[in-house]
Amino acid sequence: MDKIKIVGGNQLRGKVYISGAKNTALPIICATLLSDEPSTIRNLPILSDIKSLNLLLEQIGTKIEGKQEELNGHTTQTFSYHTPKPESLVAPYDYVRKMRASYYVLGPLLTKYGHVELSLPGGCAIGARPMDIHLSSLEQMGAEIEIKNGYVMADVNGRLHGANITFHSASVGATCNILMAAALAEGVTVIENAAKEPEIADLISMLNEMGAKIEGANTSTLTITGVEKLHGVTHEIINDRIEAGSYAVAAAITHGCLELINANAEHLQSPIDILRKVGVKVEIRPNSIVVDARNCELNGVDIYTDYYPGFPTDLQAQFMALMCVANGASMVTENIWENRFMHIPELMRMGANINVHGHASAIVRGVKKLSAAPVMSTDLRASFSLVLAGLVAEGETTVNRVYHLDRGYEALEEKFKAVGANIERIKESDE
Ligand code: UD1
C-alpha cells in the first residue's frame, strides 16, 4: 500500500484549484439511471470513489464514456452515462462494501424498474450508519422491502406513490434517495426535516433540469410532484466545500496564505466563521477564497458539528489538527457520528494534548510543537488531519493507508507540492 511522506515546517503559499464535489457527484451519477436518455456530467473529480461507482453502474448495464477536460482553470473529468435497458438490478456486496454510497442506486432503480437488490453496506469506521430512514420512507411510498442474506430486496407493484414523510434525522443519503425515488412516483411526496446540504440543492437542480418537479431547495421541506418520464441532461456539479475547507486549514496551520480557486464561500460559512475566530484572515473573492495566516496568532476555538448550515462533521478532524497547535484550550464536540475520533490517538502520538470526554467531546490543549511519526487512520477526513499535522511537525511523518485519501482528495500531493509542501508519495513498489 502507498504511503505519503511529509517533512514538516514549510509555509504554504499559492493557489489551490478546488475539484468537483465527491458527495454531489455520487448521487448525481446515480440520478442518470432515472432516464433512458444519455446524460453528461461535468466537473467530476478524479477520485477512486467515482471509479468504484462507475464500475457498479457498468455492472448494472450503463454505457459510460469519459474524457478529461479543462474547466474553470484545471483538469476535470466529464462522463456520459446511458442506461437504456439495465442488465442487472443488483448492487452486489463487493461493490457496496468498497463504497457505501453505492446505495444511491436504490431510489432510482426501484422507482424506474420496480425492483432492486442492494447489499446492505453495514457500519464503517465512523459509526453504525443505519439505513432505516431510506427504507421506511420507500415503504411509505408503497415499496415492499425484505432483508435477506444481507441484501435489501425492494419491490413495487406499478409505480411508487407520493407520501408525507418526516425524517427523524436530516440524513443526506436518505434525502437524495427519496428525492430520486419521488421524482418518478405517482403523486406528491413531501419530505419534512430533509437535509439542506449544498449537495442536495445541486441534485435538485439536476433533477429539475431532467424534467422533475421539486420545490423547496435549501429548505428542510421538499415537495416533489412525480412525473412519468425524465430526460437526459448535461450538468456541471458544484465544487467540493470539504476539500476547500481542508486546504483552508492547511493555510492556517502552516501560517501560510492560500487562494482556494473555485471555492464557494456561501457553502463554508460556519468553517469561515471559525477560522476568523481562530485569528486567520479570510477574504472572499468572486471566484475564490483567500486564507491568510501569515504573521498571526492561532487561538483555540470550540467546535460543535451539526447538520448544514452548522459546522460540517467532515471538517472536524482537520480543525482538530489545527486546534492541536493553537493557543489555549478548545472543546471539539462531534454531534453527527458516534465514533469519529479515531484521529485522536494518532495525533497524540505526534505530541498533541487531547482528552476525550465520553464518546462525543474532546478537549484539545494547544502545544508549541508536534513531532513527526508514522501514523495511519481508518477514514478519509481523519487521514487528511494527519497530513495537516505532518505539515507542521518536526521531522518526517509517514501517513499510511493512502487509499483513504485517494477516495476523496484529488491529486493531493500535486496540490500540496505546488504550494510549497515537502510531500511525496512512496509507492508500494518503491519500498
Ligand atoms: C453523508 C456524507 C458524509 C457526511 C454525512 C453527514 C456522502 C457520500 N457522505 O453521509 O461524508 O459525514 O453525510 O454530513 O455524502 N441516519 C439514521 N438513519 C438513516 C440514515 C442516517 O439514523 O437511515 C443518521 C446517521 O446515523 C447520522 C445522521 O443520520 O447520525 C446523518 O447521516 P447521513 O446524513 O445519512 O450521512 P450519509 O448520507 O451516510
Image (cartoon, rainbow, N blue to C red):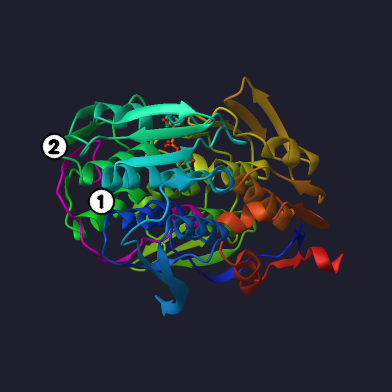
Q: Which mark is residue 229?
A: none
Residue located 55% across and 27% down the image: 338
Q: Answer above or below: position of 112 versus 52.
A: above
Residue located 21% across and 61% down the image: 231
Q: Amino acid at mark 2?
A: Val
Residue 231 lies in magenta, yes or no?
yes
Residue 86 lies in magenta, yes or no?
no
SS at mark 2 in the image: strand
Task: Choose between 235 and 377: the one closer to the eye.
Answer: 235
Q: Position of residue 264 (x, y in %)?
A: 37, 59
Residue located 71% across and 65% down the image: 10
Residue located 63% across and 71% down the image: 414
The furthest residue to the right: 431
Q: Position of residue 290 (x, y in %)?
A: 46, 64
Q: Position of residue 265 (x, y in %)?
A: 37, 56
Look at the image and give the residue range highlighted in magenta.
Answer: 217-244
Q: Position of residue 281 (x, y in %)?
A: 48, 57
Ligand 1, image quadrant it occupies: top left
Give the quadrant of the N terminus.
Answer: bottom right
Give the quadrant of the C terminus.
Answer: bottom right
Verify CB contact (< 8 Å) between mark 1 and mark 2.
no
Residue placed under numbered mark 1 in the picture: 204
Task: Choose between 150 and 163: the one closer to the eye.
Answer: 150
Q: CA distance from mark 1 to mark 2?
A: 15 Å
To which quarter of the image does residue 137 belong?
A: top left
Q: Amino acid at mark 1?
A: Ile
Q: Answer above or below: position of 407 versus 299.
A: below
User: Can I make out residue 375 in this image?
Assistant: yes
Q: Which mark is residue 188?
A: 2
SS at mark 1 in the image: helix
Task: Choose between 400 and 133: the one closer to the eye.
Answer: 133
Sequence-earlier tag: 1 or 2: 2
